Image: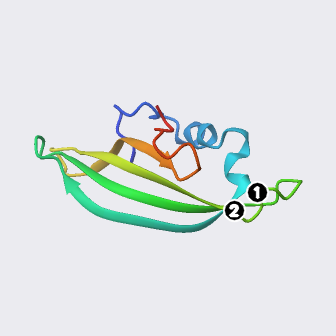
Amino acid sequence: STTHPSCRDYREDSVAWAKDLNKGGMFDSYDFVNLEAGDEEMSEENENEGFVEFKVTLRAKEDGNGSVAGRETVISERSRFLRDPADGSWSYASGDVRSDVAGLEDTKLNA
């Protein structure tokens, strides 16, 4: 698995996990535009912990009244990864998700 068992979103059943992520077809409302991965940053306290900043740009599809169609939104996440010292593999453990949507810039979206 690529998700660490300590992650609140971890599921043994990866199909159920994927369905849970796509609650209400949220991914159907956007087109993927771009993904940027930032530099890796190692923890100063733990050699088996690291961080990567990701930014994804999504473009809203037609919403019925056209008010948000075509509008782009940037979602950023500072992801935390843990390394298994036994085999050296890295797993996603958690992350702070934020958006550039007006009024939400300083809000952690996955709190």
Q: Residues within 10 Å of mark 2 (few under 14, many from 20)?
A: few
- Residue type of the residue flagged with mark 1: Val
Q: Report the front residue among 64 and 24.
A: 64
Alpha carbon separation for disc pair 1 and 2 = 5 Å
Q: Which residue is mark 1?
A: 68
Of 104 and 30, which appears nearest the observer?
104
Image coords of residue 86 (percent x, y):
16, 44
The reply to whether the C-beta atoms of the residues labelled 1 and 2 are less than 8 Å apart is: yes
| SS assignment at label 2 | loop
Q: Residues within 10 Å of mark 1 (few under 14, many from 20)?
A: few
Looking at the picture, how far across and down is residue 2, in whole percent? 39, 48
Q: Is residue 30 above or below residue 93?
A: below
Q: Nearer the viewer, residue 4 or 37?
A: 37
Label 1: element kind? loop
Q: Residue 84 occupies which quadrant of the picture?
A: top left
Q: In the rendered view, would you say 15 is above or below 54? A: above
Taking the spot 19% from the left edge, 49% from the top edge, the residue there is 87
Give the x, y percent position of residue 108: 46, 38
The residue indicated by pointer 2 is 71
Q: Quadrant of residue 19?
A: top right
How many discs appear? 2
* Of residues 101 and 30, the one drawn nearer to the viewer in this rendering: 101
